Image: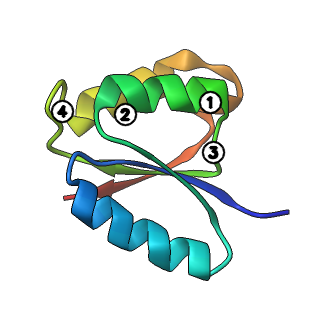
Amino acid sequence: MTQQLLMIEDDARLAAMVGEYLRQSGYGFTHAGDGASGLAALQASPPDLVILDLMLPDMDGLEVCRRIKALGGEAARSAILMLT
């Protein structure tokens, strides 16, 4: 089974570069450009790993992390890697 990664990052260029590399390495990759859309994507399909930017336009990465952990269930168990 392919590992699914969700990157919550407002820098679209960086996300595209990382996503291309990860896809070529055999990972499933989804990108969200802000915290709100990242939380929605995570709830729709919980990933194995969230790559989370610290500085986002609508809320900081620490707040997104707190909200993920407060969700409970499978979504809250997603591993989180902070990218700063």
Say which of 40 and 75 sits in front: 40
- For mark 1, does the 10 Å Cα neighbourhood hold few (<14), some (14 to 19), or many (20 or more) residues? some
Of tags 1 and 3, the one toward the viewer is: 3
Kindly identify which residue carries mark 1.
75
**What is the number of the mark on residue 65?**
2
Q: Secondary structure at mark 2?
A: helix
User: Marks 3 and 2, Cα distance to the nearest angstrom?
Assistant: 14 Å
Q: Secondary structure at mark 4?
A: loop
User: Marks 4 and 2, Cα distance to the nearest angstrom?
Assistant: 9 Å
In the displayed structure, 33 sits above or below 6; it is above
Q: Secondary structure at mark 3?
A: loop
Say which of 2 and 76 sits in front: 2
Q: Tell me which numbered mark, 1 or 4, is placed earlier along the sequence.
A: 4
Name which quarter of the figure residue 77 lies in.
top right
Q: Amino acid at mark 1?
A: Ala
Say which of 10 and 49 sits in front: 10
Kindly identify which residue carries mark 4.
60
User: Marks 1 and 4, Cα distance to the nearest angstrom?
Assistant: 19 Å
Q: Tell me which numbered mark, 4 or 3, is placed earlier along the sequence.
A: 3
In the displayed structure, 10 sits above or below 64; it is below
Kindly identify which residue carries mark 3.
47
- What residue occupies the far top of the structure in this picture? 71
- For mark 4, does the 10 Å Cα neighbourhood hold few (<14), some (14 to 19), or many (20 or more) residues? some
In the displayed structure, 52 sits above or below 59; it is below
**Residue drawn at (47%, 79%) of the image:** 21
Q: In the rendering, at what x and y percent does residue 75 appear?
A: 62, 30
Left or right side of 47 for 83 = left
Q: Amino acid at mark 2?
A: Cys
Left or right side of 13 for 69 = right
